[in-house]
Every structure is written in structure tokens, then in C-alpha cells.
Amino acid sequence: MLRVFNAMTHQKEEFKTIKPGIVSMYVCGPTVYNYIHLGNARSAIAFDTIRRYLEYIGYQVNYVSNFTDIDDKIIKAAKAAKVSEQVLTAKFEQAFDEDTAPLNIKKATVRPLATEHVTEIIDFVKTLINKGYAYESMGDVYFRARKFPEYGHLAHQSVDDLEIGASERLDDGALSKKEDPIDFAVWKGVANDASISWQSPWGAGRPGWHIECSVMAIKYLGDTIDIHGGGQDLAFPHHTNEIAQSEVYTGKTFANYWLHNGFVTVGDQQEKMSKSLGNFVTVHDLLKDVNPQVLRLMMATTQYRRPISYTETAMQDAENTLKHLTTAYRNLYFRLIDAKTESANTVIVEKIATFIKHFKIAMDDDFNVANAMTVIAEMATYLNVLASQTDRLIKENIEGLLSEYTKMLMVLGIDIEKESNFKQTSDEQVEAKINERASAKISKDYQLADKIRMELQAQGIILEDTPQGTRWHKE
RNA sequence: GGUGGUAUAGCCAAGUGGUAAGGCAUGGGUCUGCAAAACCUUGAUCGUCGGUUCGAAUCCGAUUACCACCUCCA
């Protein structure tokens, strides 16, 4: 039984979907005015891992993740780059794919754009006004936050405390437009320097932040969704505001489970990596030097609610771990060479079942990847132990082990088959060299044998001698 | 100031009442022509103080440190 930590109640709760076998999941995506940084990647990886696990245990997951492609920052960035907003956002939407694909982040089922839903957004705002929860003020439209009784619950903040913060922060201009400092914009009148705007009953303008997620989540997943996800920093104001507008609009609970991922931190003080602090590393840059699967493993093996400290050491650890897991895969795979075809050994079959069971127990506990990794590490050891047995192994057992091992790692977004560099290596020349070296070894000409090994190594081919012969792989 | 979170071996980290999983790194060992890989083995009493209990890392109280949210940010 899967249990998830619901940020709304601050408790682990049994996970029950609205429709049997199907999960509806909405994850707030990035505002596309720059390359994504490690914090964005962390969020994408966290929810991709959750999605993959849900699929692993048999759910169909309808996964919607948006691009927010209209917003003050976009207008500003477009102006700075002297291009239109559309050109800017198109560029970074594409960059998002280029950066996330190598990290094995599956594409969302639907990836809606705010700018393609402005008509629906306007209708949504009209409804809020008609219901008395929003009001027009000098070309803007604001939501009456205080009128929504549960306002602030997700962030565990009282309306009064929020108001103190808002009052200190807002300038007179903003305050004069609002009935109450905590009210938030659902529609904003046209900005002076924006090249983009839409006509509305309140004049030319653009959607406020938050509203696009409400509109698109409801449109693609329904009035109530199973899981709503995003970074911890979205709890307030983004998700808080989404809840208020959505629940006023539909009269129903917006999401049953709220999942928030922790931050990526940097430095000795474990400071949050963020755009505003300027202490970020973009995925675009990092992947020039780093194996994407190392980054994926580093992030996927930290439980999604915990912070990830981004350090050289952490990356090095992940690299070592990935190498170890890959070697285990290769080692057992190599034993197919002398495997025998007969019915599977039931001891091994049961062993596999136990690994799967423990893996699920771990992940069922709010996606406890640390414990899941313990299972995978035990499995890797088991693979190695079998691989070093002198008796011939049974083909079916090897295939069963490798298959389940591969699936578990795939839940974490690690493609171990790809990492092992099998399949795509063609080998006649290498095999010839290995045979030559084998002859040299038989005649105890170790100088020649070592020379051949060194030559291949220079080409990135690593040879390893075993009782069953010499195995090799690319570096 | 309000709210939430974190503190376990050199590092990462699991563990919510019964005498501390796992991984990395380190030391030792086995295997090996050598190498590589692998396997075995090696270490902490759980921020601090106090309390409850037969018994606490785990419950209660206090305290310290760090982080985050209360403005845009995943």
C-alpha cells in the first residue's frame, strides 16, 4: 500500500486515486525565460521518479506539466534580448527538452502553454468575478483572498500573518488598487513595455501568475486531481492561490494530495539555489562536462522532500555508484556466454521476488529511495556473487535478474543497459585482438598480452579476465 | 516577528520505544601471470541539557545551530 506525505495535512496518507488504476498528476513547470537550473531539474526528476514508480506498480499516469510563457520576467527578459516574448519562450521551451531528455525525464502527457489558453483564462476570471470572489480595479483583476476561508492552509500561514508581510512589502500604487493587501492578481493590465497583450473585458492585458495552472489543470485533468506537485517554494503563494481560485471556480477540492519537493542547496551554509540569489548552475552548462545519468542518479537517490546539497563530492559519489551498478550488470550479463538452458532455479526466482517485494515496501513509504537503493545495492552484490560462481548459470535466471534489476533502476530514471555500453559496440576487431592475446597468454608471452591490452585501452576498450574468458566493455 | 523543516560515524544516509540498515571513502584479507572487476572484513550510542519509561536516536520539555517560506523562484 502506497503512502504519500500530503503537504496539506502534513501527514503520510494512504494513496487512493479518484479513478481506479489511473493517476491524474499536475506538476508546475518552469517559467521559460532562461535555461533551467539544477533546482528546476531536481523538481522535474523528483516528479518523474514518482511518476515512474506509479507506472511501475501498474498505474496509468496522466501527467500534465505546463510552461508558463507569459509573465513579467519574460517581458523583461525579452526586452533585454531585443526579441519578442514568443521568440524568447520558444527558445527556452526547446532548451527544456534538450536538457531534460538526457536526464531520462519522460515528457509530460500534456504540456500546455499559458498563452494558448488566454480565452479560457478570461472566462475563468469572469466566473470568479460573477461569484463575487474577484473584482476589477484600474485594468487589473484581483482575487479576494480573505473571502476564501481556507486561504493559507497549504502554507500553514494565517491570513493575518500573511497580511502583515504583504502590507510591509507593497508600495502605495499596488495597495491603492487592492481592497486588501493579500489580494492577488488574476489579470494584469497591459505593461508599458510589453509587446504582447490580449484584449479582455477589463482592457488589454495578460494573465496573472497562478491562474494559468488552475485553468490548465482543470481543463486537462478535471475539477479534482489526484496529485499536484511542485517545489516547496510554490506552496505560497502559487499553490495557495491556485487552490483558492480553483475551488471557488469548481466548488470542489482542487487536489487530493499536495507533494512538494525540497531544494537544491549550495555552499557551506546550504543556501537554496535560486534564480534570484544568482547562485545557480544551469543544466545546459553542467551537461557539457558531466554524464547526465550521474546527475540523474545523484538527484533521484535523494528522497524528494529532502534538500540536495550540490557538491563535487556528491557528484563523485554518484559517479562511483553508477559505475558499480553498471559493472554488476555487465558481470552477470557476461555469464550468458556459458549459460545453460534449463528450467530456472527456484531459489533464485524466489530471491528475485524478495528483492521486488523489498523495493516496493521502500518506495511505498512516500518514495523512500534511500531504502530502495539499499535493495538495489544488495541486488548488485548478488549479481556479482552469481557472476563469480564457477558453475554454469541458467540463462533464464540471468535474464530474470537482469530484467528486474533494469526495471528498478529505470524507476529511478537510470538506463543501465545504455550505461553498460553493450549492444552498440561492434566487435570483430576487438574479438580478434582478444583471441590473439589469449594465445599469447597460453604461451606465457605476457609482454605481448599486456601490450595488446594497453593498445585496446588506448582506444577506450577495457579488458577483464575471468575464468570464463575475457570480457570487455567501452570506457 | 510568524510558520515549517533539519541536526545520526570522514562524507551521504535509513531508522518513530527494545541495546544503531545501506552506500562512498579508509585499513586488512581472498581471488589474479599482472591488471581490472568482484567478494569478505574494518568504524558511531544518535546537536546540547533535563524528564517519562524496566528500556529512547525514537515520547515530553527546554536549549543551540543551520535552512526555508511569509516578494519573484522548482
Image: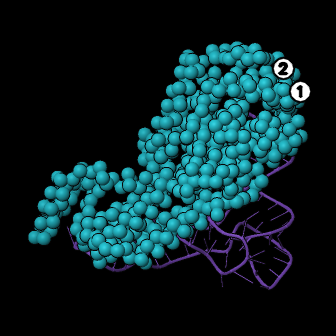
The residue positioned 49% from the left and 64% from the top of the image is A376
Chain (cyan): A
For this orientation, the residue located farthest to the front is: A20
Q: Chain of mark 2?
A: A
- Residue annotated with mark 1: A179
**Near-viewer residue (A130 or A262):** A130
The residue positioned 38% from the left and 55% from the top of the image is A417
User: Toward which corner of the image does residue B6 lie, by quadrant?
Assistant: bottom right
Residue A29: image tag = none
Q: Quadrant of the N terminus of chain A?
A: bottom right
Q: Is residue A463 left or right of residue A275?
A: left
For this orientation, the residue located farthest to the left is: A443
- Residue annotated with mark 2: A137
Q: Chain of mark 1?
A: A
Q: Are marks 2 and 1 in contact (CB under 8 Å)?
A: yes
The residue positioned 64% from the left and 54% from the top of the image is A20
Amino acid under label 1? Glu
Q: Is residue A416 left or right of residue A264?
A: left
Residue B31: x and y in percent read 29, 77
The 10 Å Cα crowd at callout 2, few under 14, some 14 to 19, many 20 or more, is some
User: How far separated are the C-alphas under marks 2 and 1?
Assistant: 9 Å
Please determine whether, in this image, residue A125 is positioned above or below residue A202. below
